[in-house]
């Protein structure tokens, strides 16, 4: 992937930073900000971090005129160009260059801890992007060198697609869904259309018909007529057209169910008293 080195992007701007002269490093443990004269900075101004291609540039400028004081090109972070001190998160040691091959190490400090955090994150994000771009370029290079899979049709090669037949097969294989609501079967042992038999021991009691004339006679009471010994006499004398029954309601209900079931109800007229 070709890089446009003429394009420069701005990563971070901080309006106030301080520069310190630092003594030579006494040991390999790192720099300590406590060894600097923190109350007497050598220079104060504005900091900018810009990126041009893969390289980031830390620029120290005058906050009023914008004149460049020093510049530190960073090709890797963390690295030797930007180092953190061991006793504070607000101070760093950077290596500046003058463009003629000479370089020097200076101390860089931020008044606010949030500014130092932004400075650190801006450099980390830039070089994370550089790493991703490098991995993407390697992947593209490996794909370009790998043999490509030829999926083109050879001369005389054909392909057949049966779209309509597949649709017809699917429609034929589809099972219709039942739309009606089925009735539950009767419980086992139940008889369809069965009639409940009359209770055992139930006997019909025929009451003695009362005489309407005796009810209206306020004279001497006449002796009651003895009951007839022929229980079915009235039934046979009334004929098949009218039947006079005077029986219990339970027997009447059972008899009515039998008559409806045999479909002979139309030939009888029942009068119950």
Image: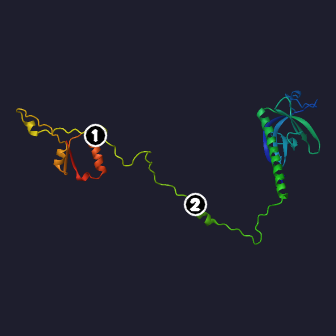
Residue 151 pos. (x, y %)? 77, 64
Q: Who's the residue at 59% across and 61% down the image?
A: 170
**Tag 2 secondary structure:** helix
> Mark 1 Cα within 10 Å, few/some/many (few <14, many 20+)?
few
164 shown above or below 115: below
Left or right: 239 with respect to 162? left
Front in this rendered view, residue 62 or 246: 246
**Tag 1 secondary structure:** helix
Residue marked by disc 1: 250
Residue marked by disc 2: 173
Occupied quadrant, residue 110: top right
Front in this rendered view, residue 137 or 195: 195
Residue at the front extreme, as displayed: 229
Q: Who's the residue at 22% across and 38% down the image?
A: 205
- Marks 1, 2: nearer the viewer: 1
Q: Earlier in the sequence, mark 1 or mark 2?
A: 2
Residue at the bottom extreme, as displayed: 156
Front in this rendered view, residue 93 or 37: 93
Residue 93 pos. (x, y %)? 87, 35
Residue 203 pos. (x, y %)? 26, 38
């Amino acid at each position: 992937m070709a890089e446009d080195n003429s394009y420069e992007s701005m990563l971070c701007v901080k309006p106030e930073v301080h520069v310190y002269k630092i003594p030579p490093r006494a040991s390999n443990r790192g720099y300590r900000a406590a060894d600097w004269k923190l109350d007497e900075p050598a220079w104060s101004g504005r900091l900018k971090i810009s990126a041009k291609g893969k390289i980031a540039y830390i620029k120290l400028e005058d906050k009023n005129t914008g004149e460049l004081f020093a510049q530190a090109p960073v090709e890797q972070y963390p690295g030797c160009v930007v180092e953190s001190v061991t006793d504070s998160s607000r101070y760093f040691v950077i290596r500046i260059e003058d463009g003629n091959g000479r370089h020097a190490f200076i101390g860089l400090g931020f008044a606010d801890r949030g500014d130092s955090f932004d400075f650190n994150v801006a450099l980390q994000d830039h070089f994370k992007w550089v790493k991703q771009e490098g991995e993407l370029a390697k992947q593209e290079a490996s794909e370009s060198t790998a043999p490509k899979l030829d999926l083109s049709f050879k001369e005389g090669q054909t392909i057949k697609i049966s779209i309509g037949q597949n649709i017809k097969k699917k429609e034929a294989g589809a099972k219709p869904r039942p739309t009606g609501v089925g009735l539950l079967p009767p419980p086992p042992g139940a008889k369809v259309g069965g009639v409940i038999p009359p209770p055992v021991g139930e006997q019909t009691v025929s009451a003695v018909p009362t005489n309407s004339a005796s009810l209206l006679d306020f004279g001497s009471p006449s002796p009651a007529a003895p009951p007839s010994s022929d229980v079915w006499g009235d039934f046979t004398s009334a004929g098949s057209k009218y039947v006079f029954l005077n029986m219990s309601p339970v027997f009447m209900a059972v008899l009515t169910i039998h008559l409806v079931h045999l479909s002979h109800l139309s030939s009888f007229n029942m009068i119950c008293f």
